[in-house]
Structure formats: C-alpha cells, structure tokens
Amino acid sequence: MTTAPPPATRRDSTAEPVAPAAGRLSWWRQAAALWAFGLREYRIWQSYRANQALWIANLLVTTLLFFLLGKTIGGQAAGLLGPAYGTNYMSFVVVGVTVNVFINTNLVDPYIRIQRSYFNGTMDLFLLSPMSIYTPLLGLMTKSILDDYPRLFFTFGFGMVFFGATFNFAPWPLALMFTALFLAAGFGLGMLSASSFYLLDIKKGTEPVQFVVQGILATLLAGTYYPITVLPRPLQWVACLIPHTYAFDALRRLLDPGARADAPVLPVQFALHGLSPVAVDGLALLVFTVVLLPLGVVAYGRGIERARRNGTLTRWQ
C-alpha cells in the first residue's frame, strides 16, 4: 500500500517573494550584462544614419533658439542677475540649458524605458534572466545618455564661440562633484517616477512625479532662464524644495568668471548665513541624494515585486 504524498503547502501571499537567481551573480556579471545592454542601445542608435543627422539638426536648432532668445533679452536680463552670477547672461543661460538637459535624462527617462518595455512585451523576459531588476533599466537608459549628455559640448561650445559666453574651468573638480550629486538626486526622482508605473498602475497619460518636479517646478521656479530673485518670496521658498535650484546656483557661481561665491541668493542661504552659499548648495544636494536615491531604489523594487505577484510585468498582446 502506497502512502499519499503530503499535501502541498500554500504559499502565504503576504510572504516576501524569493529573490531570483540574479542575487547569486557576482557584481562583475551584472556589469557585463549592463555593458551588453549599453552596447545594444549604442548599435541601435548608430544604425539609423538619418536619425543621427536629424539629432544633430535638432541639437543645432534648439540650442540656437535658446541662445538667440538669450541674445535678444541679454542686455536687460544681465541687470537682474545680481553679483552672485556676474553680468554675462549668456553664461548664465548656458549653464541652465545644459544642466536641464542632463537632469531630464535621469529624471524622465526611467519611466519611459519601463513603459516601453511593458508595452513591447519584453519586461518579463528581462526579469526572467539572471540579472538584477535594476540592470535592464540602467542598460536601456544608455540610448538617452548617448543622445543627451554630448549636448554639454555643443551648448558650451556654441555659447562661447558665437554668443560671448565665458567660463572659468579651473574649479572643474568641484563642479563635477556638484553635477554628480545632482544627477544622483535626479535619478532618485526618476526611480520614484518609474516605480509609479507598477506601484500605482500609472501606465498611460501623465506621470505625476516628473510632471510636477520637472514639468512645473523646475521649468518655472528653479532658475533655468532667469534668477529666482525675480519671483515672489513664497515661490522662492518653493524653488528650494527641488535639487535643480541648488545645482544651478552652485555651478553658476563656480563657472562664471564674474560670479561671487559669498553673495547669498536663495532663501535657504540667507537663513543659513553662517555657511557660504556654495556650502549650502552642496549640503542640500547631499541631503536630496541621501534621501531620494534609496527611496527611489526601494520604491522601484516594490513596484516590480508587486507586478510579479499580480502577473502584470508585461502586457500580453
């Protein structure tokens, strides 16, 4: 007489999901997978010659548009900059436009990549592979990095050669540090934005994180095209709630030859008058990075696990 096998135990739906095989891979295998994603995106980007020509044309047109607009109002705008940013409005706007392109990649692109993977039916394939849940996202962002980051050389070059912008590149290590902190904080916001796709089921339409932060606050209040001193005082305090404001302020003080590092502009800098304005900017960006980056990573992971439990990683055609 044979005995019946023991009944299968039902897994508690509230239990934490078992980590995939990705957790057993060493870091260099994750790096190899990331490299493969990046190489794939680069080859796709490189294969469309017409797209590259249109990319250059778009880059020239949009950059020249900003600079011509700045040239038109430069004389009047220079008087509003104040001692903190010097008197060269073209230098002021070059930093704003360039940094805004950088942060747009880190803040907006994560959601777009997740959205495309979902509707193209590839997200489940990515996550069935022995990779970290973050590796496909980082790899797919390579295309936007190839598109957007090189604009730094165009915007600074055009501004200096054709429109009279001047810069002091001596403090470049410090400027690079501020840029890295800003990009890290922006990526934290981008991960929060991407997490809303699975965590809040915002799969179409306007994503609220990037719309509020990048579409409204950064565009209107952070000082991309004008100093925040032209805003009413309450709106200046609102501008201090996003990392863009501090990055613009610090990089302009560091790179503009006529800028003064000791002249406060932001309300927070006046409140913390015991610290130099650049130190306040660095402290604020560090706080944003320490808070937003882990929060974004955790939220994105929670969203992926929720989709795994519900079977909604991919839209089946």
Image (spheres, helix red, strand yellow):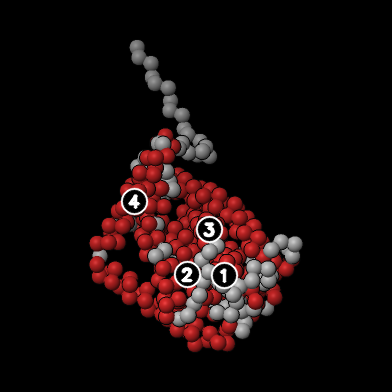
Name the residue beneath numbered marker 4: 37
In front: label 1 or label 3: 3
**Residue 97's x, y, as percent?**
48, 72
Do residues under tags 2 and 3 come within 8 Å of each other at their CB atoms?
A: no
State which tag comes first along the sequence, 2 or 3: 2
Q: Mark 4 is on which residue type?
A: Phe
Do residues under tags 1 and 3 come within 8 Å of each other at their CB atoms?
A: no
- Residue 252's disc number: 1
Name the residue beneath numbered marker 2: 98
In front: label 1 or label 4: 1
State which tag comes first along the sequence, 3 or 4: 4
- Rounded to the nearest angstrom, the CA distance separating label 3 from label 4 is 30 Å
Do residues under tags 4 and 2 come within 8 Å of each other at their CB atoms?
A: no
In front: label 2 or label 3: 3
Q: Mark 3 is on which residue type?
A: Pro
- Rounded to the nearest angstrom, the CA distance separating label 2 from label 1 is 12 Å
Do residues under tags 2 and 1 come within 8 Å of each other at their CB atoms?
A: no
Name the residue beneath numbered marker 3: 173
Residue found 50% across the figure and 75% down from its top? 166
Do residues under tags 3 and 4 come within 8 Å of each other at their CB atoms?
A: no
Which corner quadrant of the image does residue 4 belong to?
Answer: top left
